[in-house]
Image (tube, rainbow, N blue to C red):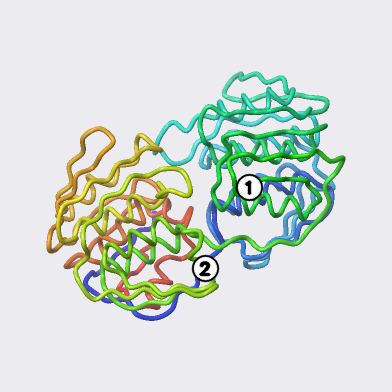
Amino acid sequence: MDKLVIAGGKRLAGEITISGAKNAALPILCAGLLTADTLDLSNVPLLHDVSTMLRLLRQMGLQADQNGERVMLNGGAIDTLEAPYDMVKTMRASILVLGPLLARFGEAKVSLPGGCAIGSRPVDQHIKGLEALGAKISIEGGYIYAKCKKLKGTRVVTDMITVTGTENLLMAATLAEGETILENAAREPEVTDLANLLIKMGAKIEGIGTDRLVIQGVERLHGAAHSVIADRIETGTFLCAVAATGGDIILKNTRSDILDAAMDKLRDIGVILTTGPDWIRAQMSARPKAVNFRTTEYPGFPTDMQAQFMAVNCIANGTSQVTETIFENRFMHVQEMNRLGAAISIEGNTAFIKGVEQLRGAPVMATDLRASASLVIAALAAQGSTTIERIYHLDRGYDQMEVKLSKVGADIVRVK
């Protein structure tokens, strides 16, 4: 397995180009199942999860041609309505094929998903919503079996806000008969990006960006061209790297308007931020200031940025509290941070951090995607050398992170 070796203490300076958002690209790829026409997608990130999703879609008969960050999909010859366990076990987003298959073909067989071990993340809200739309669903032998001759529009109120649940039900509703109202819908920019693509394909959706989506079902969807939204989590991760190490970097091909909560906290930390329509400049010349925060659904502070900000708090001036409200197992990076000399204790869903002046390099192990990123940030700020094992987690959500960081002055190498 690959690992990263990082010699800390280097300031960052230069430019980084941000990739397309993983969490937008995955549902957008699944939207290719909704039409027999061609989808022309650009700014698709080169990630392990994207490759896994494309393999899954190809296995179903979807034609998928990839050329760098451009992907052409054609769903005119889909002949398999199953997502098997061996394809689904490594990636929870595979559940996103369920809604489109059911809506267009009337049936689907999808393995219960796997992915990062950061919490239970049940799929019961997906099932509840599809049953409300008329589907008959059973779970046998680890598989979801779903059937419905024609989905019928209705009002769906999910018990909790769920991003993938909203995306699955949104895609299904586009081809349902009549009007569907999704209450308590997720408002994340990645959901908005999917909705914008569906409208280009001929869907009728109102309330985009709000917690109430109204969808008028149509007979069929057609092809379209779409560029995937910039990855706000990758953007935030590199901004945290500057906050921890100091320096002056410009992030290109990104947006500041979908990262407001994190940007506000970065300013509190002491980062000087200037922004344009598609760029962000971050400058940092002092020790970070400790900040308290609580994760919550968009537009609140994103759970996917919690670990990265905690890495900055570890070397900040002062003490801080971090409360995680989304995923119950999302403090697995704390033990590894403490191996680097951090002073973090946990009580329930709150971490208490006492900032130290200096972290020191040590061997550590990545436990999930965002934990991997937080360990990279901590290692960049630490004195001496740090080896990070199990970085296959990192490759699921960051496109060549070590290459991008090397270009702005980090001493980071991948060891095969």
Report the residue at 42% width, 49% height from top. 302
Mark 1 touches mark 2? (CB < 8 Å): no
Q: Identity of the amino acid at label 1? A: Pro
Quadrant in the picture for residue 380: bottom left
The residue carrying pointer 2 sits among few (fewer than 14), some (14 to 19) or many (20 or more) residues within 10 Å by Cα, namely many
The image shows residue 399 at horizontal and vertical percentages of: 49, 63
The image shows residue 95 at horizontal and vertical percentages of: 60, 37
Q: CA distance from mark 1 to mark 2?
A: 20 Å
Q: Is residue 120 left or right of residue 310?
A: right
Q: Give residue 254's mark.
A: 2
Quadrant in the picture for residue 377: bottom left
Quadrant in the picture for residue 411: bottom left
Q: Secondary structure at mark 1?
A: helix
Figure check: 253 above or below 126: below
Q: Which residue is mark 1?
A: 27
Q: Identity of the amino acid at label 2? A: Thr
Of circles 1 and 2, the one toward us is 2
Q: Is residue 382 left or right of residue 325?
A: left
Q: Secondary structure at mark 2?
A: loop
Quadrant containing the C terminus in the rendered view: bottom left
Report the residue at 29% width, 77% height from top. 247
Q: Is residue 137 left or right of residue 222?
A: left
| Total labels drawn | 2
The image shows residue 24 at horizontal and vertical percentages of: 59, 53
Figure check: 149 above or below 225: above
